[in-house]
Amino acid sequence: MPRPWFSAKPVDETFFESAPFVLADTFAIARPAAQVWADLTADDALHWCKILKRVEWTSPRPFGVGTTRTVSALGGSSVLHEHFFRWEEGRRKSFYVIEASAPLFKRLAEDYLVEPDGEGACRFTWTIAGEPRMPAALADPVNGRLLGTLFRDTRRHYGAG
């Protein structure tokens, strides 16, 4: 039986300030910005995040605005098709979900910002913004705990303070 797909609405950069649900964390990482950017755009990007089963780039390199990828999470029970609407090579990338295999969000987007911070170090700011399909009072606590694991795993991976 084919997997059902649920369309999500596109967003732009203003969604990160206006979304009903926003999670963000900034990591001080003792590695050069170029190395962290390479990790975030590698074939096995985010492999350290336990809830992610697979991240697959579905566009050829070099990546840029219009790049797509498919992310399988929660043991493969949740699959997201993503579209990158902002790409500043080596510094920033943002995407929104085009469609998902579970009807959790009307809109969902992420922003990754990597900034040099002295010799051999950087700051990585990861923002996740969403508009749940169910009432926020029910969705926000669950989404916060689940998506928060991405930040905890990233902090652990980089030994970030």
Image: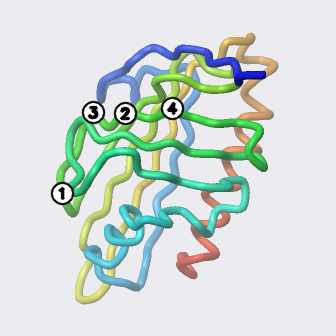
Rounded to the nearest angstrom, the CA distance separating label 2 from label 3 is 6 Å
Picture coordinates of residue 133, whole percent (x, y)? 67, 12
Dots 4, 1 in contact, CB < 8 A: no
Q: CA distance from mark 3 to mark 1?
A: 13 Å
On screen, residue 53 above or below 101:
below
Q: Are marks 3 and 1 in contact (CB under 8 Å)?
A: no
**Numbered label attached to residue 85:** 3
Between the residue at mark 4 and the residue at mark 1, the CA separation in whole angstroms equals: 22 Å
| Closer to the eye: label 2 or 1 | 2
Callout 2: 10 Å neighbours few (<14), some, many (20+)?
Answer: many
Distance of label 2 from label 1 (alpha carbons) = 16 Å
Residue that mark 4 sits on: 129
Rendered image quadrant of residue 111: top left
Above or below, comparing residue 85 to residue 131 in the picture: below
Give SS at disc 3: strand
Question: What mark, if any, has residue 89 been given in the picture?
Answer: 1
Nearest to the eye among marks 3 and 4: give it: 3
